[in-house]
Image (cartoon, rainbow, N blue to C red):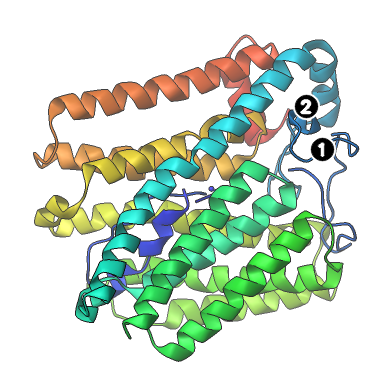
Amino acid sequence: MANSLILAAAAANKSLLAAPSHCHSFSLHPNCPPPHHSQSFPYKPFLHLHSLSLTSPQRRLIPVPALDSDVPHPLDLGSTVKVKNHRSKEIEEWDSWTAKFSGGANVPFLLLQMPQIILNAKNLMSGNKTALLAVPWLGMLTGLLGNLSLLSYFAKKRETEVIVVQTLGVVSIYVVIAQLAMAEAMPLPYYMVTSVVVATGLLLNFLNYFGMLNAGIWRFWEDFITVCGLSVLPQVMWSTFVPYIPNSILPGVISFVAAVAAVVMARTGKLSEKGVKFVGAISGWTATLLFMWMPVSQMWTNFLNPDNIKGLSAFSMLLAMIGNGLMIPRALFTRDLMWFTGSTWASLFYGYGNILCMYYFNSVSGKFLLAATAGLVSWIGMALWRDTVVYGYSSPLRSLKELIFGS
């Protein structure tokens, strides 16, 4: 749901500018609430030992499901304790490995964004500011919002390795936005507001992660990203199909009003418990759905303009597939449906899906496609198999059932 794949949304709104999308990843989505969590958003008690270090693998000995507000059918706590008692060693080892896999996603995601940053820097130093106009600042801003939303989601869950991935996404996209502002490709007032939001978001997430943030301030931040996320998602989806549908800001306006109304009703006690949980899940799911929309937007662009496929980098698509794929075992292990959905979707439909399109249009060789296919299938198969062994199940279908429906 994670650069959560994180860097993909950087190009979320390229369709608004009638340019092909070059988004790369979901990056996309542990385990304890803020110290004074809002009573409006109930949370599940967690099972890890609070006395352990935040960097110790034992702190997450038991795979913890996503917060009730983010996962509709959390894993049954009783069955989790039973698993711990009989398979603590295997659980601990696989917990450690999946965390390392998630942390390893930083490498492909960093490799994805660095070429753009370096190219922008060269153009700025040579005085070629016009070249930076090719990078849509509105799309970068959309990606930044998605990363901030997912950063808040994972910070709330204490997924340290993925917090680093999402923070990297926020910082790298902000660097690009700063370069665009220097080239006067982005209006200065928008850049100033963006800078304040980024600085505030990073600070609040940092304080919340270490339990030093007032609950009221954190609730306000959650409301802010909920309203922003729900406003942006329908507008991006609508804009993808312009000019085949009328160019309008109506979807964004309607969703903005609906988001504000939902947040106000949740905070004033006008919603049922399920309604409050639904509102609490909006920010994470909208960020995840935004990243999931990236492959749809890219493939739509490929369909309309097949020649644009030549502008895609097979290596970049491979990195996107790898970065998202590295997060799949962790998302499955923690039974985080939102994270698993976003990472799997981005790996299959953005990374691998675009490689498949490139092969169809003769942009990559059959050997490249075969290698990518074998690698992805083997990796997902390994994740399902290992999860099944760790939990002592007889079929990976049991793991998937728990992920989707709970135990």
Examine the rendered structure and indicate whether residue 310 appears above or below residue 16: above
The residue where tag 2 is placed is 61
Which residue is rendered at x = 57% and y = 20% of the image? 397
The kind of residue on which mark 2 rests is Leu
Q: Residues within 10 Å of mark 2 (few under 14, many from 20)?
A: many
Mark 2–mark 1 Cα distance, whole angstroms, equals: 12 Å
Pick whichever of labels 2 and 1 is earlier in the sequence: 1
User: Can you give x and y, in whole percent of width and height, for residue 43 in the image?
Assistant: 83, 50
Whether residue 129 is visible here, answered yes or no, is yes
In the image as oriented, which residue stretches furthest toward the bottom?
189
Q: Residues within 10 Å of mark 1 (few under 14, many from 20)?
A: few
User: Can you give x and y, in whole percent of width and height, for residue 102 in the image?
Assistant: 56, 37
Q: How many marks?
A: 2
Corner quadrant of residue 265: bottom right
For residue 53, the mark is 1
Q: Quick one: SS at disc 2?
A: loop
Corner quadrant of residue 287: bottom right
The kind of residue on which mark 1 rests is Ser
Which residue is rendered at x = 80% and y = 33% of the image? 59
